Image: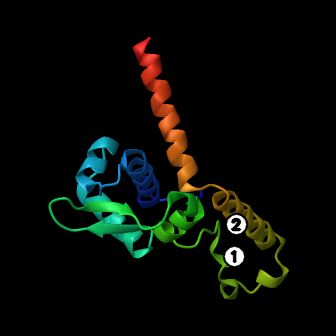
Amino acid sequence: MMKLSTKTRYGLRALIDLGVHYKGRPILVKDIAKRQDLSEKYLEHIMLILKGGRILRSIKGGKGGYMFLKDPSEITVREIVEILEGNISPVECVDKKEICDRSDNCVARDLWSMLKERINEFLEGITLKELIDKQIRKNRERIIYYEI
């Protein structure tokens, strides 16, 4: 089974949370961790990876925290996944042909290569901004539902 790690799942949740709650000021990791029910220490590790991937920047000091380095409309889910997960391949031989003598003549490898392409196209077609906007809509629907 091809599974994304908790690092990727939590990282995407944290980025969506950051986008939903961003009001022009940096957001503290502890606030995101609390809202998302995540370990603050683990989330800090993830945020540092995203900072290194040039999605986030950190601000030090009393009014510090994390902000987006670039606009969420310019960040694709594929970019986030690749920063946190590395290359997305369903099987190793798709990216490392040399590990199998049959790679050049293997229909199964061709299938896995096509799957990788489709996954990448799908993830490339979704921006972080779209997910943030969708979360904002879901939050509003939940509030309206509970107010009735």
Tell me the crowding category of disc 1: few under 14, some 14 to 19, or many 20 or more residues within 10 angstroms, Cα based: many
The residue type indicated by label 1 comes to Val
The residue type indicated by label 2 comes to Lys
Q: Regarding mark 2 in the picture, which secondary structure is present there?
A: helix
Using the image, tell me which numbered label, if any, was put on residue 120: none
**In the image, what residue occupies the spot 31% across and 49% down?**
32
Q: Regarding mark 1 in the picture, which secondary structure is present there?
A: helix
| Quarter holding residue 37 | top left
**In the image, what residue occupies the spot 52% across and 34% down?**
137
Q: Is residue 21 above or below residue 109?
A: above
**Where residue 78 appears, x then y in whole percent?**
59, 64
**Where residue 123 appears, x then y in whole percent?**
64, 59
| Quarter holding residue 91 | bottom right
Q: Which residue is tagged 1? A: 94
Could you say which is closer to the camera, residue 85 or residue 66? 66
Q: Are marks 2 and 1 in contact (CB under 8 Å)?
A: yes
| Residue 111 in the figure: left or right of residue 143 | right
